Amino acid sequence: MPILDAEGIVLRQYSLSEADRIVVFFTKEHGILRGVAPGSKKVKSRIGACLEPLNHVRIQYYLKKEGAELAYIRQCETLRSYLGRSPSVRGLYGLTYLAEIVHEMSEENNPNQLLFRLFLATLGAAEKLGVRSCLLRYFEFWTLRLSGLLPDYGYCSLCGKCVKDVGFWASREDGQGRCRSCSGERGLRVRPEAMKPLALLAKLPPEEFASLAMGEEESSDLERLAQALFELHLEKCLKSYPIVARMLRES
C-alpha cells in the first residue's frame, strides 16, 4: 500500500471507537478527504493534537484498497493552528462557520486549489483582525464565485439594464438579479449602498476588505443575499450561521 501525502485543513472530527476518530480534511490535492486516525483519542497519541479543527496540517496516509472511502492517517504535522489553545467564543464559532461552508461546497476527490488558497487567506486575516462581519461576507461571496454560483449583479439578467447605481432584486427562484421593472419589486432587495462593497469584493484581499467600514444596511443586504444563494444551491440552511449571526449582532 503506497504512502500518500497531502496538505490540508481539518474541518471536523467524529468519534469512531474508544481510541479512534474519523477526521475530515479539506486538502489542496484531493478536496475533501475522510480518514481514520487510529489511536488519536489516547492521551499519549502522537497525532491527536494535530487533528484539532482548523489546524493547517500535512498528513501521510494510505488506502487499504483502491477507491476506499476512508483513508488511514499514518502521520500528521501541524503547520499552523488557527484556533490556538484558548480560542475566543467569537473566533471558535466564526471559523467553524467557514469550515462548514467549505465542507458543504466541496467534494471528495475533486481538488479546488483556489478555494483552498481563499480559505487559508481568510483564516490568516481572522487571526490578525479577529472574526468580523466583513470578513465573513468576503468568504461567502468568494466561495460562491469560485463555485460558479455568483451571478453578475451589475446588470439585470432579463433586460440587461445596468443596475450598479440603483441596486437590484434577487429572484428567490434562481438568484439572478433584476431591475425594478423586470422584478416587479419582488425578490430579495439589494440596495444601492451595498453595490460598492459587492464590487470591491473582487478587487481586494480579505484582510483589506475586512478592514472596511461597512454600514448596517449594506452588511445586512449582503448577508441576506449570501444566505439566500447558499440555501438555493445547497437546498438547506447552513447550521452554524444563526449562532454566528446572533453573536456578531450582539457584540
Image (spheres, rainbow, N blue to C red):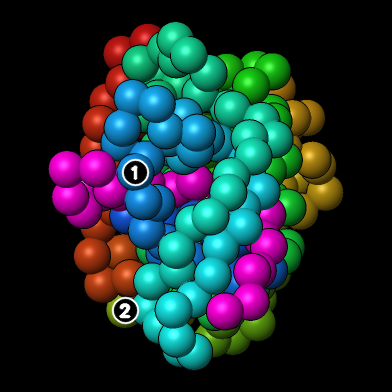
Magenta stretch: give its range.
1-21
| In the image, farthest residue toward the left | 18
Q: Earlier in the sequence, mark 2 or mark 1?
A: 1
The crowding category of the residue bearing disc 2, from other C-alpha atoms within 10 Å (few below 14, some 14 to 19, many at least 20), is few
* Residue 74 x/y as whole percent: 53, 55
Q: Which residue does the image show at 73% across and 52% down from the upper left?
A: 117
Left or right of residue 174: residue 85: right
The amino acid marked with disc number 2 is Glu
Residue 8 falls within the magenta-colored stretch: yes
Which residue was labeled with disc 1?
A: 39
Eyeballing the image, is 159 above or below 243?
A: below
The amino acid marked with disc number 1 is Gly
> Can you see residue 67?
yes
Eyeballing the image, is 113 above or below 42?
A: below
Which residue was labeled with disc 2?
A: 173
Q: Which quadrant holds residue 241?
A: top left
Left or right of residue 148: residue 106: left
Q: Which quadrant holds residue 1?
A: bottom right
Label 2 vs label 1: CA separation? 48 Å
* Residue 57 x/y as whole percent: 63, 43
Q: Nearer the viewer, mark 2 or mark 1?
A: 1
